[in-house]
Image (cartoon, grey):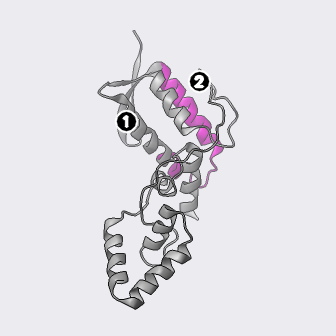
Amino acid sequence: MKKTVNVAIGGRSFILDEDAYNALSSYLDSFKAGVGQNGRSEVMDELEMRIADLFRDRLNGREVVDIEIVKGVISQLGMPDWQSDTVSGSYSAPESRPETRSPRRLYRDTDNNMLGGVCSGLSLYFNVDVVLVRVLFVVALICGTAGFWIYIVMWIIAPSARTAAEKCEMRGIPATAENIRRFSESRRK
């Protein structure tokens, strides 16, 4: 019989067994130690929300998060660049692996927007220069009103990339711990 702990991660409540709690706690502590004081809570909130999403996806009707689920989540998120190869406690971090590409999702990029972020979001989605997309919209606007209406419809349909995980999806990169930290810090600048 194992002890269980009820914890709140990313605003959601989870039941973790004792081994899973210890591994997750040491991972979060080591991550927190590497993040600078400036914006630490924001980065940690983003990371916890991502962990909560991954826990919810992996539970599949079960109630208790076990050590295997925590190991899977930590290996998916990876260790940040500043972190050594091991986390204190019972879990070792995975070997560093090359960054894999994730499927891209269309979002409006409000960090690099001129009006609504539609052109910037489209340029990231199709991996082309944002100037080219903006020029195409201006030409479409000059040639007729289609450019204006397409832009307005895209502005309404495409959601804005607000969280660090959404910014990673928009660029087609995995939402790892390092990428979440990078995009959380870029939002504050």
Residue 22's x, y, as percent? 52, 24
- Circle 2 or circle 1, nearest the eye: 1
Residue 188's x, y, as percent? 55, 62
Q: Residues within 10 Å of mark 1 (few under 14, many from 20)?
A: few
**Which residue is the extreme one toward the top?**
1
Point out which mark residue 165 bears: none
Overall secondary structure of the magenta section: helix
* In the image, residue 117 above or below residue 66: below
Residue nearest the observer in this picture, 135 or 121: 135
Residue at the (50%, 47%) spot, across then down: 102
* Mark 1, secondary structure of its residue: helix
Amino acid type of disc 1?
Answer: Asp
Residue nearest the observer in this picture, 45 or 183: 183
Q: Which residues are magenta?
A: 19-45
* Residue that mark 2 sits on: 91
* In the image, residue 128 above or below residue 17: below
Residue at the (54%, 39%) spot, across then down: 77
* Mark 2, secondary structure of its residue: loop
Q: CB atoms at circles 2 and 1 under 8 Å apart?
A: no
Amino acid type of disc 2?
Answer: Tyr
- Earlier in the chain: of badge 2 and badge 1, it is 1
Does the rendering let one see residue 110?
Answer: no
* Residue that mark 1 sits on: 57
**Which residue is the extreme one toward the left?**
61
Q: Is residue 128 magenta?
A: no
Q: Quadrant of residue 34?
A: top right
Cα gap from disc 2 to disc 1, whole angstroms: 21 Å
Q: Is residue 29 magenta?
A: yes
Residue 16's x, y, as percent? 41, 25
Residue 123's x, y, as percent? 50, 68
Q: Quadrant of residue 185?
A: bottom right
Residue at the (47%, 57%) spot, across then down: 170
